[in-house]
Amino acid sequence: MTQDKGKGFGFGLGKIKELQEAFQKAQQVQQGAQQLQQELEEMNIEGSDEEKLVTVIMSGNQEPREVKISPEAMNKGDEELSRLVTDAMKDAYAQSTETMREKMETLTSGLNLPGM
């Protein structure tokens, strides 16, 4: 059995520099993610049904905040009102999801992260 003495772990100075850069990028992303989390929390994203009779307001983190129901929506009956509220919720959810996606793309742009 022979041992290769003095070979180290295969990390040259170039590899160490790449590792340091990767750690710095990871720290930047973490800081950016924390800031993004705060921004999303403070956002109000509105969604509504096609007729604009019901509006749902969510945070950028998809936390429901408020539901506004117009008098016309109230007069449409239980089933139609339920459909309007559901449509408004779906719209607010879709808009908040798109906002989160766009913000994450901005945060990670130029980082060459796998899977992003």
Image (cartoon, helix red, strand yellow):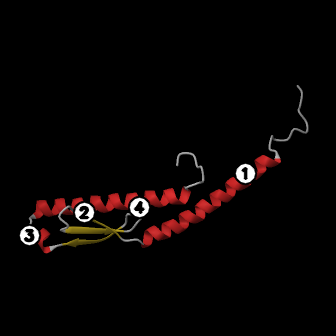
Tell me the quadrant of the picture where the N terminus can be found: top right
Quadrant of the image occupied by residue 55: bottom left
Q: Residues within 10 Å of mark 2 (few under 14, many from 20)?
A: many
Q: Residues within 10 Å of mark 1 (few under 14, many from 20)?
A: few
Number of labelled discs?
4
Q: Which residue is drawn at the image coordinates 76% and 47% (left, top)?
A: 15
Q: Which mark is residue 75?
A: 3
In the image, which is nearer the foreground, mark 1 or mark 4? Answer: 4
Residue 7: x, y in percent? 87, 38
Q: Which residue is drawn at the image coordinates 18% and 68% (left, top)?
A: 53
In the image, which is nearer the foreground, mark 4 or mark 2? Answer: 4
Q: Which residue is mark 2?
A: 88
Residue type at mark 4 is Thr
Whichever of callouts 1 and 2 sits on the residue coming sooner in the sequence is 1
Helix, strand or loop at label 3? It is: loop
Question: Seen in the image, is 95 located left or right of residue 52?
Answer: right
Residue type at mark 3 is Asn
Residue type at mark 1 is Leu
- How many angstroms separate mark 3 from mark 2 (CA)? 17 Å
Helix, strand or loop at label 2? It is: helix
Whichever of callouts 3 and 4 sits on the residue coming sooner in the sequence is 3
Helix, strand or loop at label 1? It is: helix
- How many angstroms separate mark 1 from mark 2 (CA)? 47 Å
Whichever of callouts 1 and 3 sits on the residue coming sooner in the sequence is 1
Whichever of callouts 3 and 2 sits on the residue coming sooner in the sequence is 3
Residue 79: x, y in percent? 12, 59
Q: Are marks 1 and 3 in contact (CB under 8 Å)?
A: no
Q: Residues within 10 Å of mark 4 (few under 14, many from 20)?
A: some
Whichever of callouts 4 and 2 sits on the residue coming sooner in the sequence is 2
Q: Which residue is mark 4?
A: 99
Q: Which residue is drawn at the image coordinates 60% and 53% (left, top)?
A: 111
Q: Which residue is mark 1?
A: 19
